[in-house]
Image (cartoon, helix red, strand yellow):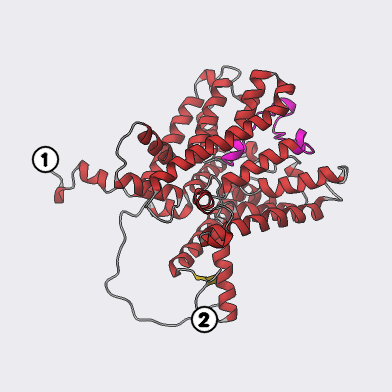
Amino acid sequence: MKEKNGAGPAKRRRSMGQTQFLAFGFFVLIMTGTLLLMLPFSSRDGRSMDFLGALFTATSASCVTGLVVADTWTQWSLFGQLVIITMIQIGGLGFITIGVYVSILLRRKIGLKMRGLMQESTSALNIGGIVRLAKKIIIGTILFEGGGALLLAIRFIPQYGFLRGIFYSIFHAVSAFCNAGFDLMGHTGQYNSLSVYYDDWLVNLVIMSLIIIGGIGFVVWDDISKKKLHFSRYLLQTKIVLITTAVLVFGGGLAFYLLEKDLLMADMDTSGRILSSLFSSVTARTAGFNTIDTGALSDGSKLLTIILMFIGGSPGSTAGGIKTTTVVVLFLFVNSSIQRTYGVNAFGRRLDDEAIRQASSVLTINLFLALGVSLVIMGVQNLSMSDTLFETFSAIGTAGMTTGITRDLVPLSRFLIILLMYCGRIGSMSFALSFTQQKRITKVKNPMEQISVG
């Protein structure tokens, strides 16, 4: 028997929009990883991880966050670690990008629908050249992660032996490039992350470089590869991303140095302070590693970290957050309003009004999600406001940094953090739009009436 209006199964499948498809794809990835991590041989002790713990870990890996309820090295066997790093790689690049590249290798035709999904997944500005962009993303990822792994091997092979050193190098290179923050340093102390390397220039510079490269966005990669070092010829997005990234990295590093040089970094030499400050600034941009004790940061440094986590990386990258372009667009809009100028302008170009609307929506949705979940968690658990806000903003920004309360969260709190990580990866606005089947066009406008604002 046919359904009403002929809405059969085929039509329902076609009605799934791009944002819904991407959201569903990440859901499938997370659930697959959850089931694999629940297998007894995924755990080092041979005992199955409970469903919520496995779900939390799978979500954190797939959404390249880094928050964990169990130390990665202590809890997971080699198989479990391989499952985690595979989810990180797929989640960082996006399953659509990998799927397109596999289709290219198999010489299959890339249809318009797949190209549209690829554009949505990478936040590309145009659908033209999207297949070529997929090739650049995969090849670039192999080169950057491979180069990073080779450099890290210089340090890790002498310390851990050849095979273990190679595995550690690859694992941390992939985790850093994908801004995931998972590490295998639990043998030096659970949840220590990279703290034993706080003054190691090689490890710090390699990890920071991978985080920044992965976080500037694939569209920026493509633009730089085409126009080389001709800054004036770059796309407006590329200019904004590069300048904002530099300001946040070095400005944040200077702020951390001034806030912690006489406190947490008091016993370090100048070299250690500089490295720790820069690393703290870079990793807060959704990477999740740490070389100093995050829980011991001063209140000023915690607030600075929350701000950096909330901003995050850039569109179409492996990083999360509301994105650098969102912050710049809103800043320029406010500046334009104060100066009473026509339109929002940057580098001799005027921004589209739609970009301003989207930036406002993204900021509002993310802010209210993080604050709302914080209120609920503090309502069900006796946790401090600073630690709770740090945790929720870390989750929504897929930053993966924590003051140490992640493993103390009750089931409801863990589920809410899982939801924030998921929203942070696919985009909170995209998550909201995934519940909308189609645009609703208003044919008749209501009468206008003024209200006072501000």
Position of residue 254 in the picture relative to residue 176 (left or right): right
State whether residue 143 appears in this view. yes
Mark 2: which amino acid? Ser
Locate residue 442, reporting x and y percent: 30, 69
Position of residue 157 in the picture relative to residue 32 (left or right): right
Of 27 and 2, the residue lying toward us: 27
| Residue designated by label 1 | 1
Of 401 and 379, the residue lying toward us: 401
| Residue designated by label 2 | 452
Q: CA distance from mark 1 to mark 2?
A: 56 Å
Which residue is pictured at 45% across the width and 70% down the height?
353
Q: Quadrant of residue 255?
A: bottom right
Position of residue 60 in the picture relative to residue 408 (left or right): left
Label 1–label 2 contact, CB within 8 A: no
Is residue 170 located in the magenta-colored stretch of the structure? no
Task: Look at the image and tell me in which quarter the C terminus lies.
Answer: bottom right
**Element on which disc 1 rests:** loop
Q: Is residue 190 above or below residue 332?
A: above
State whether residue 180 appears in this view. no
Q: Magenta segment range? A: 175-201
